[in-house]
Amino acid sequence: MTPQSPQTPEPSPTSPAPSAPRTRRTSPATPVPRTVPEMLALRAQQEPERTAIVVEGEGTLTFGEWERRSHAIAQGLLGRGVRPGDRVGLLFGSRDWADFAVAYCAVQLAGAVAVPLSDRLAPAELRYMLGHCEASAVLCGRDLEAPDGDRWTAAPAELEDAGSGPTGVRVAPEDLAQILYTSGTTGTPKGVGASHANLAFGCETRPNRRRFGHSRHLLHAFPIGTNAGQTMLLNALDARPAMLTPARFTPGRFARLIESYGVGTVFLVPTMAIELLNAGLHERHDFSSVVLLGSAASALPPSVSVRLTTAFPNATVTNYYTSTEAAPAQTIMIFDPARPGALGRPASGGALRVVGPDGEPLPPGETGEVWMRSPAPRSYYRDEQASAEAFRGGWVRMGDLGYLDADGYLHLVDREGDVVKSGAFKVSTLQVEAALYEHPQIAEAAVVGVPHPVLGTAIAAAVVPRSGGEVSVTDLRAFLMERLAGHELPERVLVVDVLPKNQSGKVIKRELRGLFGAAATGRTEGT
Amino acid sequence: MTGQVASRLAEMVEAASGGRLPAGEVLRSEGSLAALGLASLELLRLVDAVEDEFGVVLDLGGGAHLDSFPLLAGHVAENLP
């Protein structure tokens, strides 16, 4: 990577529209990549000198470098015994986005399966994920170490001297390409497997039709290991603008990047958008270059969308709704004051329906489960029971309740089950409860999501100490930090004598949420 | 100098937490800010505020300076421009 300073402002947009739905090309003139390595090869051939990735303060990566380094590391992986189909963990923080992108493609060039892992994960979570997929190796970013296990670890640079050029390994569209771990409804993370066909679906290869063509830079701060982060990596491979990301995200740094690069396309989550607005960063920085402001991971509250249209005066504010399981199927909605809460209609080759308890589609206006169908479905890796629960006949149960209006626009009403959306992350309350139950002084624990002005939902835990025991909330958080990622730590902890339960002994979560709304209900409120 | 910085930082932690963590409690704390209850989003707010007010860039990814409030105060005091 070579250092790079901000460039001249973006060109004026020729079209303010966000990405059109990815559609498959039928013309034989330009090859259609069917695997991620084919996407990289085509782009490196078309534009070897073009900047693909900029990590602010760290450097840049061109398509030519991306391909050359990926080939070298793929040779290194094969030399160390990695075989097609093996799972390889990729543990990287945001400042190493470029190395991560190289390692990701290298794993796939070796015919293996990339398992992106966030540096925010707690050691116990990493151990579980690497154990579950039986990773044979882990490539790590700077200052990161994989948990001990029956596998080898290395930094990407250690593998780059093994050779150069293509590996000769054949990678097929139906081959498993990636496993992403996400919170599941049973409390343990689920590995969502995606084939190359899934990841390469809708890749646009014609130079004059590349997505986000109005922008020179696409800025985001999604963590590695999330579906949104992986979507950005695919954008880096096939969209027009270079992918720009801060080495370490804060709202202030993000705002400075928009201004200094004259960024044309910005992707964020509602939590970040609200932080930018509440901190008044739009009043201190020039956001006029932004022509597309995309929000992913959860729905933008309408009032926030309205504020964003003012803060980003030239931007089309757009909501994208999908999930790790459903991608690339999604709904896309350009904010429309006439339909402020709508999330749009299906795009990217996906399909959408709202169904009743019998699985049959409901008429417009009736609330039911939201299902989406991807053109190249994903599935849970090594978990047939959970797959059967979440994936039905190619349809993905989104875990949301909603309805379609008369024009087919999706509106969300509530979230079902034991998974809550906090900021950009899905958090399994069962997983947090399981971690609390590991504490020797805790007799009972229950976790719910409670309304939060910025995160949408914050994690709140009520705990009952063992008889005669005392629980320090500070000690409890320190205990949980070994077991849970930062976004899973309960922001509010209430120590109570009893949990509200129904006659069959099940915790009544609605009443539990009420405890966090009432002052001084519990014995101790730890915040 | 550290004392003044610590007092001001404690107020900034209180502000970053939306008033949930009283400055006095922060000043007396010895554990990590996360264990004290500063959520990850609030930590980002604090990092921006420290950068704006003190001109000190906090590295969120490493270093021991975020492991406790006294270490944070010491780090900021030592790195004042």
Image (spheres, rainbow, N blue to C red):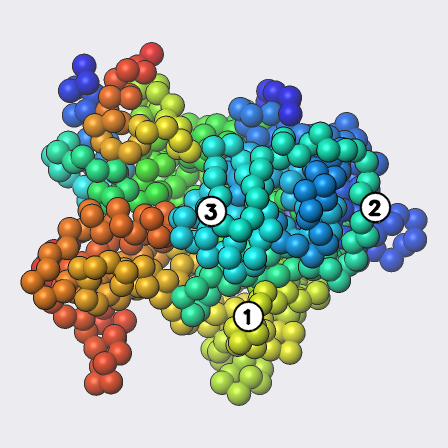
Q: Hey, what amino acid is under mark 3? A: Asp
Find residue A200 and report its horizontal and vertical position in percent. Answer: 73, 54
Specify which label sits upstream in the sequence, 1 or 2.
Answer: 2
Disc 2 target residue: A168
Measuring 14% from the left and 64% from the top, which residue is drawn there? A466
Q: Hey, what amino acid is under mark 2? A: Gly
Find residue B27 and report its horizontal and vertical position in percent. Answer: 15, 31
Disc 3 target residue: A148
Answer yes or no: are tags 1 and 3 on the same subunit: yes
Measuring 52% from the left and 29% from the top, which residue is drawn there? A257
**Outermost residue toward the right?**
A29
Specify which label sits upstream in the sequence, 3 or 2.
Answer: 3
Disc 1 target residue: A383
- Nearer the observer: mark 3 or 2; the answer is 3
Q: Hey, what amino acid is under mark 1? A: Asp
Q: SS at mark 2?
A: loop
Q: Nearer the viewer, residue A192 or A135?
A: A135
Measuring 61% from the left and 67% from the top, which residue is drawn there? A379
Q: Quadrant of the N terminus of chain A?
A: top right
